[in-house]
Image (cartoon, rainbow, N blue to C red):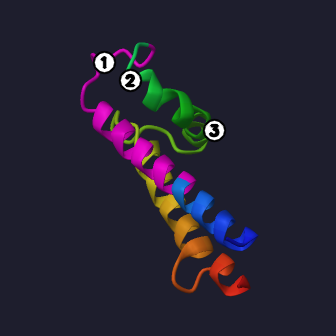
Amino acid sequence: MTVATLTNWTLGLLLGLMILLFIFRIILTWYPQVDLNRLPFNLVAWPTEPFLVPMRKIVPPLGGVDITPIIMVGLFSLLREILLGQQGLLRMIH
């Protein structure tokens, strides 16, 4: 296994996991009574919150709804496609 293959595999797994966590975060916004500081919900909140806090400063709630997790799914999906997609930058290296 080459370094490039290992990097592609690891980065793909990490970006895919973050997209999945943001999707779970979107679902959790439908249930405002959920305490994000308690297990198992903090397993979703802990890795996603550092990305959402700066984004919330840029994008205010729209009609009282926090749309930043939706934006982050789009950004992470775009990043994954640019780096690892069929014509991605890291695919072109090897």
Q: Amino acid at mark 2?
A: Phe
On screen, residue 80 above or below 26: below
- Residue drawn where x is 41% and y is 13% of the image: 38
- Do the residues under discs 3 and 2 have CB atoms within 8 angstroms? no
Q: Is residue 85 left or right of residue 50?
A: left
Residue 21 position, x and y percent, is 43, 42
User: Which circle marks residue 54 in the picture?
Assistant: 3
22 in the magenta segment: yes
Residue depth check, mark 1 versus mark 3: number of the one nearer the observer: 1
Q: CA distance from mark 1 to mark 3?
A: 22 Å
- Label 2 residue SS: loop
Q: CA distance from mark 3 to mark 2?
A: 21 Å
Span highlighted in magenta in the image: 14-37
Q: In the rendered image, which residue does mark 1 sit on?
A: 34
N-term-proximal mark, 1 vs 2: 1
- Do the residues under discs 1 and 3 have CB atoms within 8 angstroms? no
- Do the residues under discs 1 and 2 have CB atoms within 8 angstroms? yes
35 in the magenta segment: yes
- Residue drawn where x is 37% and y is 21% of the image: 40
Q: Is residue 1 left or right of residue 34?
A: right
Q: In the rendered image, which residue does mark 2 sit on?
A: 41
Q: CA distance from mark 1 to mark 2?
A: 8 Å
